[in-house]
Image (spheres, rainbow, N blue to C red):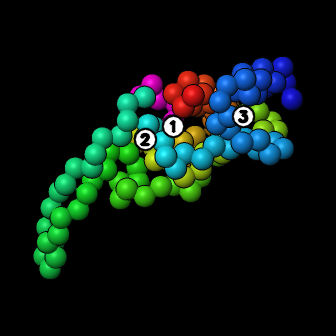
């Protein structure tokens, strides 16, 4: 583990325990988190869903439209961000803003490991600051 990784772990360990450590996996359960956990600067809570009418030829129904993705109001099971060559940050049960979602998919599909590593550091700092 690099000195920077040790410092990051020590900083998190000194505060309220929000991350779970299991070998090279650092995970966090975001089930009850109402902010976007991604690398964006937004720390506002997700607003209540908007109501819209879905007008189909055979089916007119009212549905909720959520601000974060997935728009259905569900949660993504997990997003994985490499922290360094050996460690991985795993975000479990998350809702995420469209911008961070698009960024994660783009970096993952294009195998932009360095960008994902930078995002992992930003995410850990953001969660440490807002969840403690």
Report, in whole angstroms, how far the alpha carbon at label 1 lies from the one at label 2: 9 Å
Report, in whole angstroms, how far the alpha carbon at label 1 lies from the one at label 3: 16 Å
List x then y, in percent, for residue 117.
67, 32
**Residue at screen point 48% across, 42% down:** 33
Q: Mark 1 or mark 3, which is nearer to you? A: 1
Q: Residue furthest right?
A: 1
**Residue at screen point 31% across, 50% down:** 66
Which residue is disc 3 drawn over? Answer: 83
Q: Which residues are magenta?
A: 37-42
Which residue is disc 1 drawn over? Answer: 37
List x then y, in percent, for residue 130.
51, 27
Badge 3 crowding class, 10 Å Cα cut-off, few under 14, some 14 to 19, many 20 or more, is: many
Is residue 39 found inside the magenta-colored segment of the image? Answer: yes
Badge 2 crowding class, 10 Å Cα cut-off, few under 14, some 14 to 19, many 20 or more, is: some
At mark 3, the secondary structure is: loop
Mark earlier in primary sequence (1, 3): 1
Which residue is disc 2 drawn over? Answer: 34
């Amino acid at each position: 583990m690099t000195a920077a990784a040790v410092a990051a772990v020590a900083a998190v360990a000194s505060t309220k325990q929000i991350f779970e450590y299991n070998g090279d996996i650092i995970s966090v359960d975001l089930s009850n988190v109402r902010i976007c956990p991604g690398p964006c600067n937004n720390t506002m809570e997700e607003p209540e869903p908007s109501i819209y009418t879905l007008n189909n030829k055979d089916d007119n129904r009212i549905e909720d439209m959520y601000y974060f993705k997935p728009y259905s109001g569900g949660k993504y099971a997990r997003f994985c961000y490499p922290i360094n060559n050996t460690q991985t940050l795993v975000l479990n049960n998350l809702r995420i803003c469209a911008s961070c979602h698009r960024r994660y998919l783009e970096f993952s599909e294009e195998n932009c490991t360095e960008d994902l590593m930078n995002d992992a550091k930003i995410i850990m700092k953001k969660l440490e600051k807002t969840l403690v």
